Amino acid sequence: MTAAQPVVPQRVVPQSPVVVVRTSAAVPPGLLSAAAWDVLRARPVLCLADDHPQREALAQAGVDVTVEAVSADEIFARAPLVWLAEPPRYGRPGADEALVGALLAAGAEEVVGSVDPVGARLLDAVDVMDRLRSPGGCPWDAEQTFETLKRYVVEEAYEAYETVEEGDLDGLRDELGDVLLQVLFNARVSAEGGRPGAGWDIDDVAAGLVAKLVRRHPHVFPTHADPASAGGGLVAVSGAADVVTNWDVIKEQERRDKAAAAAAAAAAGTAGTAGAAGTPSPFAGVPMGMPALSLAAKLLSRAAKAGVEGEPPSADVLATLLAELDDDGAAAREPGRRLGELLFGVVALARTLDVDAETALREQARRFRAGIEQHYAASSATAH
């Protein structure tokens, strides 16, 4: 009894005298389907533009591509041949899209050489940013720096936040695009160098993110390369709570590793002063530029994890602090500081109630705005 022979799929030979080959600009040139290579090697090949991304790769493979502006009738008259279609770029169809449509309507066959991979539009976004910052691009974009861009990072994030509050998911899609723009913009500025610490690019940003996500999800990605080990190298978790616990442990180790590296660099004279190796501040990595209520909540959370948070004030204590502001004593002479203590205490109390103080205040602000606008609209209608 002989072993079954593998089934080799038969390639379909195009029957039409004219074949349109479509390719993706996001796939490296030359990575084409077998059917595309067959027809490209079998017939003369025409295309519209000198800069077609496949021309050089085809030439290296011995396939000549002639650049020529012709009509659909002329192409059929000179058949058999291949029309190498212009790939869509930046979400726009190729410049020969009308011609391709006429060829297909007249009976030409279509062969897919390559298709856009997942994430192709991200590559387009990187390419567009490169064009904007390069000579001949946009003068305004070319003048931007880390300093001029920093406010947009915050503004765009808040605009995305607002669309979530309003339940506007179409708006969220657009605003996340603006957030992505800031990531691409800053990465491009860094890639151009010119400042100490710069020189990294968007691939470095993405690589760092991938490494961080893999490192912080040991329950999804094996911690070592031995798949035969217990659990396949995965850390066991019983639910989301375990994931958060592991996440905190991993982040703490990352902070300790960073502190140790900073101390070593300081000792070698390659960085500023640093704390003792392996003993980072519990607040390391907390940006002090956060919104004040969110900042207070983050600091309280970090302090709690470090075991130094202290007892949160009760509602009665907060009421006492508020009453002191009406007195003529020290509280009245330092109203800013006392109000700060009061607000910080409110955030601490909100934590005990499992309430996000930032969200609670924003929701109240929205209710206040709606109430005032409704009153104003009613008053205006009465006046008219």
Image (spheres, helix red, strand yellow):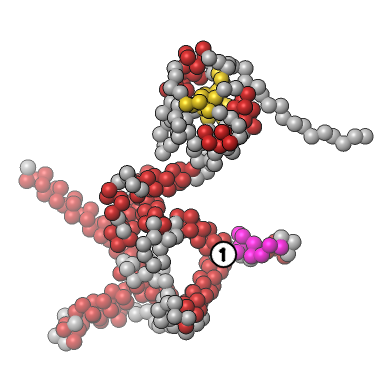
- Residue at 37 percent across and 79 percent down: it is 312
| Image x and y of residue 268, in percent | 48, 81
Answer above or below: position of 186 versus 8. below
Answer above or below: position of 266 versus 2. below
Q: Nearer the viewer, residue 204 or 9?
A: 204
Main SS of the magenta segment? loop
* Magenta-highlighted residues: 218-226
| Image x and y of residue 273, in percent | 41, 81
Answer above or below: position of 262 versus 119. below
Q: Secondary structure at mark 1?
A: helix
| Image x and y of residue 200, in percent | 44, 60
- What amino acid type should be assigned to the residue bearing mark 1? Arg
Q: Could you tell me if residue 259 is visible in this image?
A: no
Looking at the image, residue 269 sits to the left or right of residue 383; the answer is right
Q: Residue furthest bottom?
A: 329
Residue tagged 1: 215
| Image x and y of residue 354, in percent | 41, 68
